[in-house]
Image (cartoon, helix red, strand yellow):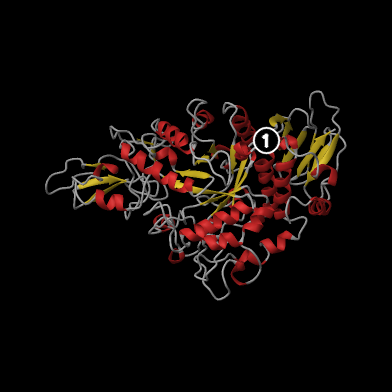
Amino acid sequence: MHWTSKIAICAIASSIGALTPSSVGQTSPPKAASAEQDWWKNAVIYEIYPRSFQDSNGDGIGDLNGITERLDYLKTLGVDAIWLTPVYPSPQVDFGYDISDYKNIDPQYGTLKDFDHLEAEAEKRHIRIIMDMVMNHTSDKHDWFIQSRSSRTNPYRDWYMWHDGKGETATDKGQVPNNWQSDFGHSAWEWDEKTRQYYYHKFYIQQPDVNWDNPKIHEAFKDIIGFWLKRGVGGFRFDAITTLYEDPNLIDDDVILDKNGKPFLNNYGDITLNDTRTNNLPGTHPVMQEMRAFSDTFNSNKFPGARVLIGETYLPNIAELAKQYGTPDKPEFQLPMDTQVGFINKLDVAEFRAKLNDVETSVNGNIPLLVFDNHDNARMDARYGDGIHDTDIERVISTMLFASRGTSLFYYGDEIGMKTTPPTRKEDVKDPVGLTGWPKDKGRDGERTPMQWDASPNAGFTKAGDTPWLPVPPTYTTVNVKAEEGDPNSLFTWYQTLIHLKKTNPAFVHGDNTMLDTTNMKVLSWLRQTPGAPSVVVSVNFTADPQTVTLSVPNSSGKVKTILKTPGATDPTSITQIQLGPYGVYIGELQ
């Protein structure tokens, strides 16, 4: 089914029992909102972990041709763009985030010809492809680093972060330069015996950090970005972007102490540090201004309009997030991720209200990018679920994602309620994070399991008899696309309907967000409004108990017409009496 079919839309609407032809098929969004130049402002972006999406050749690993096979599904869901985690050649120490060649495709995923075919087929469905751009580090097998570590006089030596040890002598390597730690455990410094210096790695030992004080690094990455932009990609998601720079004086990070003045130990057994000297330093901003200016010079006959730059931006407060957008004369990211909303990891009405209000009102009029899930975090069931109402809770979360102003980013399998399924034995762990942190940290395998397409063997991810790179969770027999596509009460149908409303209801397209009933600690309610169109109210119950909500909107009669509601909810005639079931959702248009 395509969203262009009003008959099909109405069939979904009537089966849910909340939508009607008049509400779903109402006026199209304003022309300005759908302009190609601004395509990203109300977009729906779908993260694909290629290893786990669809295997087309029976080797148990997802690939580009598999993604191409599923483009019709993504079009039906309502996706505007797909973000691919890295598909470049890589030793796969960090499953692609250790890149050995930025201008090619890893043979596990296919070829450049396969990529071009994927892009051409995506273009036919008006779906853009967003590549992952990793500029903080390369693989230690990248030719730059191989040359860099070959000798201290090699021209590539200063492309990476090399330093002498403390107290180093001709026979003693000395101590590491300082106490900085890798995000994946233990010291961030690795000794190289051949050239007798340490190199810095914010992440794995096999992921040496590049030196952004070297102008040649700037030019090299612009060349890489240009290579993919010329192939027509719709933009980039910049990985770990806030870690590009470190304190040039190599001052130790501060130790985090508990209330008794004792240091915390993390899952790797290390003393926990405050990483303010290796994260979110101001040098990142000029780099992104440079990359934005460079990308803005490209246009595409395939997709006119802006190439979007997305930032992986884990930041401490809204003021720091606002900086990531840049300024009108020096723009940076169009869409830095607001991880402060999506990773609260508890259903706290007051905190969600404050964080959503922050990003809607305190980023200088820029467009929020909301995200609740990704390949580095346990899925929503593990972070928000209670084991009983998980699907209902995921409806609550998806409503915040799609019914708030801005761009929505979600992770493959969220739309069917895939669950986190970590390994139960260390010998089954694939992720090095789990190998290092076991048993306290079981790694990220649990949120990277194969997509559950149907109830056939291996969930339709790969052929029966083949061995998937990660086990298919046992939930696949009931939690799968095929089972949910035909169910009017499924999570998949809920996602599909919300996405359609996001695209067609004028108040949802670019309407402002205003929080309502702000003293209520059990229900989150807000108003979407834009000039010349009916306003819309949204209420979501954060509890397992029924709730009755009384809302007040200035200059409104309070009369309301239901647009969407969770199964079993009533149809109120006024916003002064909205009844919500356990983790219930109500969306209504003011009359």
Q: Can you say whether 133 is above or below 553 in the image? A: below
Label 1: how many Cα within 10 Å (few below 14, some 14–19, many 20+): some
List the single residue furthest toward the left. 170
Residue drawn at 61 percent across, 72 percent down: 457
Residue 161 makes an appearance in the image: no
Which quadrant of the view contains residue 253?
Answer: top left
Residue 373's x, y, as percent?
57, 48
Q: Is residue 195 left or right of residue 405?
A: left
Residue 230's x, y, as percent?
48, 47
- Quadrant in which the N terminus appears: bottom right
Q: Is residue 332 left or right of residue 32?
A: left
Which sits in the foreground, 387 or 489? 489
Residue 246 makes an appearance in the image: yes
Q: How many marks?
A: 1
Residue type indicated by callout 1: Ala
Residue drawn at 46 percent across, 48 percent down: 228
Q: Is residue 320 left or right of residue 545?
A: left
Residue drawn at 49 percent across, 55 percent down: 444
Residue 62's x, y, as percent?
52, 63
Q: Can you say whether 575 is above or below 227 in the image? A: above
Which sits in the foreground, 78 or 541? 78
Which quadrant of the view contains residue 271?
Answer: top left
Mark 1 highlights which residue? 33
List the single residue furthest toward the right. 573
| SS assignment at label 1 | helix
Residue 233's x, y, as percent?
52, 48
- Quadrant in which the C terminus appears: top right
Which sits in the foreground, 278 or 31? 31
Which quadrant of the view contains residue 162?
Answer: top left
